[in-house]
Image: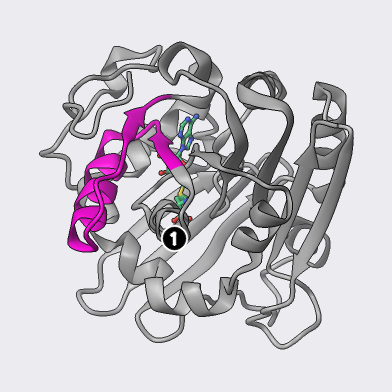
Amino acid sequence: TTAADRSPDTAAGLDDTEAAYSPEEVHQEFGENPNEVRDTNHYQDEYIKGFVDKWDDYIGWEGRAASEGSFFIDQLRARGVEKVLDVATGTGFNSVQLLEAGFETVSADGSAEMLARAFHNGRERGHVLRVVQADWRWLNRDVHGEYDAIICLGNSFTHLFSERDRRKALAEFYAMLSHDGVLILDQRNYDSILDDGFSSKHKYYYSGDTVTAEPEYLDDGLARFRYTFHDDGSVYHLNMFPLRKDYVRRLMREVGFQKIDTYGDFQDTYGEDTPDFWIHVAEKT
Ligand code: SAM
């Protein structure tokens, strides 16, 4: 099913046809009780065109390249990886980095909006991304082949709201990896937010001048973040599940990964030695 220009209205991988592509959507739909929206399928309604158009302002490709450095490329090269599946392509930042580093890369995502943007971003940099629309829970149905590595980056796994979905997704990743394959999955450091709280003076601001990203609501089952874009004042939200680091490590082990190393990203943005992100590197053998 790999196709460079797959039609964005092919909602392959979705179990809910209502979640299909809706280009006219300008407002995110969280209903009357946004803090009750705790649904794995809801990412489809969150990454609407307006937000996707802004996403690159948020992540900032240059700044991100500088802060990530060659960490992921080094991890992959050290393991002799050739084929990589980016399962959370988003607007394509990591896929483009991988292509430019010479890896054979397939770019998957459940969001047609995101993939369309990734494809466009790739073209602007002289690449033709091989994009596939696929939900992680049914990855093997829509993406074919075997990969030496799977990457799931940019705090994406947080979109899964039930343990069943997390186990299913990890099992699908495991199955698509070669016998000695590696999964690299990152997550925001929710332990520090859950344990220290955010309502105090301790503010969590990201991405400098152009965007403010801050938690708006938090409990054990929901981290709702607000993203304010300063150029036009637009505001978007993401509802995410606050994953604890050791919980994710345990799930990975239980699904079959043999060795899990977790790295802290010490590019801290709030003046302490607390990493913003954890990066799990999970090996099958
Ligand atoms: N990796 C990109 C980055 O760092 O900029 C994108 C990160 S964005 C926070 C999360 C991505 O995961 C979105 O593109 C979203 O569509 C995708 N996603 C969330 N849940 C998914 C699922 N169940 N199956 C497939 N993709 C999913």
Determine if residue 27 is in view: no
- For image coordinates 82% across by 55% down, the residue present is 262
Q: Position of residue 185 (x, y in %)?
A: 66, 46
On the image, which quarter does residue 18 sit in? top left
Q: Position of residue 190 (x, y in %)?
A: 72, 56
Q: Please name the residue that numbered disc 1 is placed on.
A: 97
What kind of element bears circle 1? helix
Give the side of residue 218 with respect to residue 83, left or right. Answer: right
| Residue 150 in sight | yes
With respect to residue 203, does 166 lie above or below?
Answer: above
Residue ID at (58%, 74%) = 69
Is residue 19 in the magenta section? no
Q: Quadrant of residue 248?
A: top right
**What residue appears at the point 77 percent right and 57 percent down from the top-left corner?**
194
Of 35 and 6, the residue lying toward us? 6
Q: Does the stretch in magenta take in 128? A: yes
**How far from the left and from the top, in percent, is residue 165?**
63, 22
Where the C terminus falls, by quadrant? top right
Q: Position of residue 176 (x, y in %)?
A: 60, 22
Quadrant (top left/top right/bottom left/bottom right) for the N terminus? top left
Q: Bounds of the magenta span?
A: 105-134
Q: Nearer the viewer, residue 103 or 182?
A: 103
Q: Residues within 10 Å of mark 1 (few under 14, many from 20)?
A: some
* Colouring mode (rainbow / by chain / secondary structure / one colour): one colour
Image height check: is 135 above or below 78?
above
Residue 274 vs 183, above or below: the answer is below
